[in-house]
Amino acid sequence: MKLAFNLANLHRNMTGINPSVGCLVCKKNRILSYGVTGIGGGPHAEYSALTNLKKTNNLNCFVSLEPCHHQGKNPPCTKSIINKKITNLYYSETDDDPRVQGKGLEFLQNNRVRISKINNTYKDNFYKFYNDFNKNFIPKVYAKIATTKNYYSFVKDRPQITNIYSKKLTHILRSEINAILIGVNTHNKDNPLLNCRINGLERLCPARFIIDPNLRIKKNSKLILSAKKIKTYIFYSSKNKNKIEYLKKKNIFLIYLPFVKKNEVDCKQILVTIGLLGYKNVLIEGGYSTIEKFIDHNLIDFFYFFKNNEFINKKMSHSFKRIYMTLQKNFKYQKKLQQVYLKNNTLTVFKK
């Protein structure tokens, strides 16, 4: 079972909205095959371990998570287990996905597979965030900002504050989350693409969400022009029919969200909506006002605070010092990566 979890850990945070699972098939203490959930979410671990297996009698199967029993983009793992005539199935964690929740185990028992639970001996609660999401459908929220040493996020004539090492770390972070969220001001100012540009991880680009109540988004931006390749959503409150029709033609998914007060939308409702769409975690890369709202509503679980080693005298943007002090005060865990890792940049990771 430890090996099953080690296999699952190979693709941890790389399997999209599916959990990463490890599976081994054994006979008389000899490992015959193994599998792990594929990058992006498929194929599932059990299918990978069983599909090319020739021996089909008196086999034992070890899985880190209860096998699925529903048809999605991948076939039900329980049917693969039955087809290969697995005798004993050992699992560690139950799956709290409403489509599973014991149904897989019950189906296997009804088909004469002996089921045994092995307590999780992995170094941490591997599926905690996954199972938490399946209970409340609120995604885990990450946020990221980059500033100068004295907390300003904009330097004139400098499109990039941090260096190439911090930038690559940001793209790795994007590959490990399901959705990315920004405000329309950041979109119109930076014209970002918000994809993952690490060789080999390009297909792990997150879905993109933009908070734009008044539909001020600029036409023909990078996000709009790439919406056919990467799912792109806009939260809006406007009744601008022409803009709505234009965005629909560009393959943008529009989500109506009424104002809770003048020109403000409900941040928690945004997260619930993202969760109900199936996205289990979200990265906020917005500007000051977007991050401030989510911080003030206590809706951020992890915060990545990058700083370069420069001081700027002119206040070219909002100071993030108040947010940094709020993080230091309210977040329990802090880990700082020094310049030796990031070459004249620092990264402080805050965890609630």
Image (tube, grey):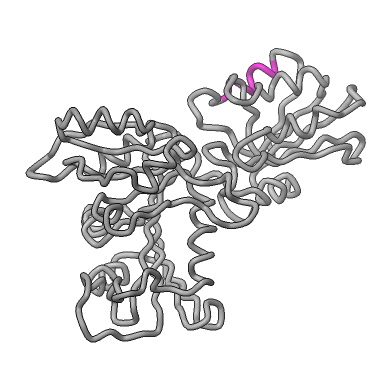
In the rendered image, the quadrant that contains the C terminus is bottom left
Q: Which quadrant is home to the N terminus? A: top right
Q: Is residue 69 left or right of residue 116?
A: left
Q: Position of residue 148 (x, y in %)?
A: 34, 78
Displayed quadrant of residue 322: bottom left
- The picture quadrant where one finds residue 46 is top right
The residue at 37%/41% (across/down) is 224
Q: Which residue is the extreme one toward the front? A: 220
Q: Which residues are magenta?
A: 102-109
Q: Is residue 225 visible?
A: yes
The image position of residue 72, as x and y in percent, is: 57, 23
Where residue 241 appears, as percent x and y from the top left, is: 18, 28
Q: Is residue 115 left or right of residue 59?
A: left
> Measuring 59% from the left and 47% from the top, which residue is drawn there?
14
216 vs 67, left or right, is left
Q: Is residue 5 above or below residue 344?
A: above
Of 193 and 145, the residue lying toward us: 193
Task: Indicate whether residue 106 is drawn in magenta.
Answer: yes
In this rendering, would 333 be left or right of 44? left
Q: Nearer the viewer, residue 98 or 36?
A: 36
Tally of numbered discs: 0
The x and y percentages for residue 259 are 13, 38
Residue 124 is inside the magenta segment = no
Q: Name the residue located 39 percent from the left edge and 44 percent from the top edge.
A: 208
- The secondary structure making up most of the magenta span is helix
Tell me, yes or no, if residue 121 can be seen here. no
Q: Is residue 13 above or below residue 28?
A: below
Q: Residue at x 54, y 56 (%)?
A: 197
Residue, far left: 262
